Amino acid sequence: MTEYRDALSFLESVRDSKAEQSRLRERISELEARCNRLTTNLSGMPRGGGMDYDQQLAALADETARLKDELRRELNHARSVEDFLKRMPNRMYRNLLMRQYINCQTVPSIVNSLRKIGIDRSQRQVERMLNAARAEAERLWRETEGDMNDG
């Protein structure tokens, strides 16, 4: 079980989770491609040395299953961060934190996104709003005593 000391560390953990999700998806795709190549090369002729095809396929399937379990855990963690943010009462704060943490947007990117929907704020204003949003998230975290710590 992973324990987070505060809301900010919990929110920031989703970035690592997103990077890990990407790495796991890549690795799963590689293993599935290897498995497909292996099944394409199947022939009834025995070959010398190394594992036989059944052992290779079983090893690839086991590793793929293990990585898919890891990916599921990472997706659940990201969902728990998103669920925590959805509990924030202030819609603007919730929106800003979703953009920064769930969507992994930078402050300049958030400014541009807000402009596209008719909210014209400077980068400094958005930074101040994000600070206030983080403080609100921290209050919510303390009120719920870190209920969002995941396993």
Image (tube, rainbow, N blue to C red):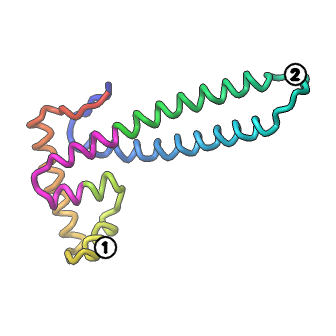
Name the element at disc 1: helix
Drawn side of residue 31 relative to residue 148, left or right: right
- Mark earlier in primary sequence (1, 2): 2
Q: Nearer the viewer, mark 1 or mark 2?
A: 2
Please state the horizontal and vertical placement of residue 14, each as a whole percent of the image: 34, 44
Residue 49: image tag: 2
The residues tagged by marks 1 and 2 sit, at their Cα atoms, a distance apart of 59 Å
> Which residue appears at 64% of the width and 42% of the height?
30
- The residue shown at (19%, 48%) is 86
* Boundaries of the magenta span: 77-97
Q: Which residue is drawn at 80% across and 22% down?
A: 52
Quarter where residue 108 is shown: bottom left
Q: In this view, does 14 lie to the left or right of 7?
A: right
Q: Where is residue 60 in the image (x, y as percent from the top left)?
A: 66, 30
Residue 44 sits inside the magenta stretch: no
Q: Dot 1: few (<14), some (14–19), or many (≥20) neighbours within 10 Å?
A: some
Secondary structure of residue under mark 2: loop
Residue under pointer 1: 112
Question: What's the residue at 69%, 36% (across, down)?
Answer: 35
Q: In which quarter of the image is the N terminus?
A: top left
- For the residue marked with disc 2, what is the amino acid? Gly
Task: Locate residue 100, reporting x and y percent.
Answer: 30, 57
| Amino acid bearing label 1 | Asn
